[in-house]
Image (cartoon, coloured by chain):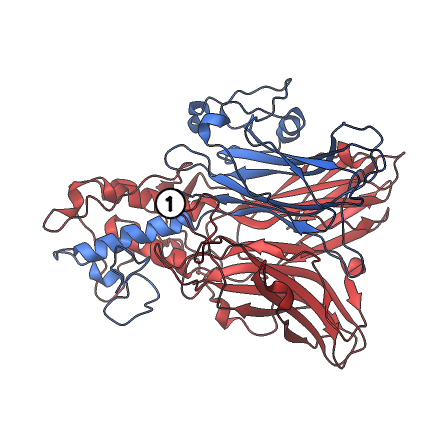
């Protein structure tokens, strides 16, 4: 039998499946039992775990052909990256230990011809909101710049996709706060947020870009799905 | 007085909770109060970023409807729209409207140059059109409110293509303490309680306030352990009869003019690729997935009955799983829902990428939606919202 330490919420004395932690166990002048107390702590532990969010969730939709979404279906310049897709800005959470919640990303795409190779590059960028001067951001030592663009090194990954539409091993773990120090403020987002973001916005904003390049101008690439969510992890 | 919402979630520990030791002698309770405020005041994703891909002709508008479960304490939403002119030689202008707030901005003629248009929608009060946050899903009538929240995009100067829509809740700086409605005179339907917890009342050595036996002492809803417990109770009740707030997994919506339609009597998949997801855990060490996934369809028929359906599985088996259908009977767009209360996989917080490994092969769950006619001639669908509802 699971103990209250294991359970997200206690079964309670009125039977299993009690809908919530019963507050009548807290009574003035009475001792608070340890079991109840641990349950309360575990409840909030779990509530925090559940506070992670899906930030990007897109899958090709259509009733006939796959609903592919290329911004550049045929590449005119070989070995040049083209911006294929852009998400954000969206908020990102910070853990109690100062680590950004790690993203888990899935990417789906395809190439029209097996003879040609197309490479996707996925970049997740963190940036500070220039209107927000909260201390936590400052303590992260995130460089803020409106004139330079620096890519986060670690979260970039290169994926060579097959010719069939399928999710292809694109599960990534993004860096923790130590890598965050190398991230940047992307100028376009920096400018876009000026005057629009109230001071009540707290924390880190994020942007996800998908780039693509081909090794032959005849190659066509398709992006068919993106899925990005926060994850607490170990 | 108000409860500050910490930007960073505090760390709490069960270690100080020990038999025969005084409970209020540690800082544990303050952290509980702080994380209660964090969870309730941090907000979440109402609409994950997705790609509508439809074109809106100049001089007209498109309305996008979503079925959402707002966090009870959040009073500001951030809409993000990315669009570009359909004419590569002409910039366009768009007006975005949501909940009485709007912004008009120029959008470029090329997608790669498009930038996010941000609109803040302020909620001085909950709209009656929305589901009250404390209404359990199971009590919602079969015919759900058609437009929980909506955004309208007007195209001006030139046709536009809508590339991205997303909506996120903006974290609070602070919340009101407890229920508040008793002293403010408002009803719970108009102003949902925020249940902020007074963290200072949870200091070591502070008196432990408790609930009266007759459950009438609302003065302690924001104080001490009773406040923290009440905050937990409400946090778990707000959207679900059993557990934590719902988490949006997938969303897609287009204007009515761009609705998908079919006259086929066989299942037509809506999302070509099954969508990956991880169901949440019911409790910390749960080993058998028990989360409920619920899907909402915004659909209509020309007459009689059509079908919307979905199926789920892992990557290895979803192709062989049959669709489970729900009847579509309204001739105007209406929300229909169905759910699955058993899952093939769930997230594992001990794993680097969250995938649960019960057989040596960590896996995702995947879902796929479809629709078809039954006795109707034609079926339309213009929106899907999928939630990880509860455990």
Q: Quadrant of residue B299?
A: bottom right
Is residue A157 visible in the rendered image? The answer is yes
Image location (x, y in percent) of residue A118: 74, 37
Q: Residue at x 70, y 55 (%)?
A: B64
Taking B214 as reference, is B254 above or below it? above
The residue positioned farthest toward the front in the image shown: A115
Quadrant where the C terminus of chain B is found in the figure: bottom left
Q: Which chain is red?
A: B
Image location (x, y in percent) of residue B203: 21, 40
**Chain A rendered in what hue?**
blue
**Does B376 sit left or right of A53 as displayed?**
right
**Does B51 sit left or right of B324 as displayed?**
right
Image location (x, y in percent) of residue B259: 77, 61
Q: Nearer the viewer, residue B123 or B89?
A: B89
Image location (x, y in percent) of residue B70: 52, 54
Q: Residue at x 40, y 65 (%)?
A: B242
Q: Nearer the viewer, residue B94 or B18?
A: B18
Instruction: Specify the subunit that label 1 lies on.
Output: B
Q: How many marks?
A: 1
The residue positioned farthest toward the left in the image shown: B20
Is residue B227 visible in the rendered image? The answer is no
Q: Quadrant of residue A170?
A: top right
Give SS at disc 1: helix
Q: Residue at x 50, y 27 (%)?
A: A180
Q: Label 1: how many residues lie within 10 Å, few (<14), some (14-19) or many (20+)?
A: many
User: In this figure, which residue is indicated by the disc labeled 1?
Assistant: B37
Taking B131 as reference, is B48 above or below it? above
Taking B216 as reference, is B303 above or below it? below
Quadrant where the N terminus of chain B is found in the figure: top left
Q: Nearer the viewer, residue B64 or B366?
A: B366
């Amino acid at each position: 039998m699971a103990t209250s330490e294991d359970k997200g919420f206690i079964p309670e004395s009125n039977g299993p499946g009690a809908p919530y932690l019963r507050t009548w166990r807290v009574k003035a002048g009475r001792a608070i039992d340890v079991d109840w107390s641990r349950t309360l702590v575990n409840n909030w532990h779990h509530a925090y775990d559940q506070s992670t969010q899906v930030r990007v969730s897109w899958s090709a939709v259509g009733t006939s052909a796959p609903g592919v979404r290329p911004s550049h279906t045929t590449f005119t310049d070989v070995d040049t990256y083209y911006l294929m897709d852009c998400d954000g800005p969206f908020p990102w959470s910070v853990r109690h230990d100062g680590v950004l919640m790690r993203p888990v990303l899935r990417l789906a795409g395809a190439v029209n011809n097996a003879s040609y190779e197309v490479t996707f590059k996925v970049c997740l960028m963190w940036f500070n909101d220039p209107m927000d001067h909260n201390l936590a951001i400052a303590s992260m030592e995130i460089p803020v710049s409106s004139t330079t663009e620096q890519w986060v090194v670690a979260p970039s990954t290169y994926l060579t996709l097959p010719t069939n539409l399928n999710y292809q091993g694109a599960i990534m773990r993004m860096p923790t706060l130590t890598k965050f120090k190398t991230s940047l403020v992307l100028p376009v987002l920096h400018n876009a947020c000026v005057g629009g973001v109230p001071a009540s916005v707290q924390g880190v904003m994020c942007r996800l870009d998908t780039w693509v390049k081909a090794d032959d101008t005849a190659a066509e690439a398709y992006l068919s799905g993106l899925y990005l969510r926060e994850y607490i992890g170990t | 007085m108000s409860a500050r919402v910490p930007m960073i979630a505090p760390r709490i520990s069960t270690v100080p909770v020990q038999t025969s030791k005084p409970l209020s002698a540690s800082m544990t309770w303050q952290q509980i109060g702080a994380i209660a405020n964090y969870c309730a005041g941090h907000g979440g994703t109402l609409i994950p970023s997705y790609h509508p891909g439809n074109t809106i002709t100049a001089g007209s508008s498109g309305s996008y409807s979503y079925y959402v479960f707002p966090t009870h304490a959040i009073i500001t939403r951030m809409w993000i729209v990315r669009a570009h002119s359909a004419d590569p030689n002409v910039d366009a202008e768009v007006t975005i409207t949501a909940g009485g707030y709007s912004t008009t901005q120029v959008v470029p003629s090329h997608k790669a140059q498009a930038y996010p248009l941000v609109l803040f929608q302020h909620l001085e009060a909950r709209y009656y059109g929305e589901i009250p946050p404390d209404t359990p899903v199971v009590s919602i009538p079969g015919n759900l409110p058609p437009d929980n929240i909506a955004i309208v995009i007007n195209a001006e100067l030139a046709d536009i293509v809508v590339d991205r829509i997303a909506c996120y809740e903006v974290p609070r700086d602070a919340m009101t303490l407890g229920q508040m409605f008793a002293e403010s005179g408002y009803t719970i339907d108009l102003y949902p309680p925020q249940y902020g917890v007074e963290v200072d009342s949870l200091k070591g050595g502070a008196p432990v306030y408790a609930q009266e036996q007759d459950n009438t002492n609302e003065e302690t809803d924001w104080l001490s352990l009773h406040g923290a417990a009440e905050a937990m109770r409400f946090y778990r009740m707000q959207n679900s009869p059993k557990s934590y707030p719902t988490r949006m997994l997938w969303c897609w919506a287009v204007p009515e003019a761009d609705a998908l339609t079919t006259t086929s009597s066989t299942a037509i998949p809506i999302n070509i690729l099954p969508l990956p997801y991880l169901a949440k855990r019911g409790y910390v060490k749960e080993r058998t997935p028990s989360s409920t996934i619920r899907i909402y369809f915004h659909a209509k028929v020309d007459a009689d009955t059509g079908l919307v359906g979905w199926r789920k599985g892992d990557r290895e088996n979803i192709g062989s799983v049959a669709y489970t259908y729900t009847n579509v009977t309204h001739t105007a767009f209406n929300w229909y829902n169905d759910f699955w209360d058993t899952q093939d996989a769930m997230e594992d917080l001990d794993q680097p990428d969250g995938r649960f490994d019960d057989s040596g092969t960590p896996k995702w769950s995947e879902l796929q939606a479809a629709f078809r006619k039954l006795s109707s001639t034609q079926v339309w669908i213009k929106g899907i919202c999928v939630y990880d509802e509860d455990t």
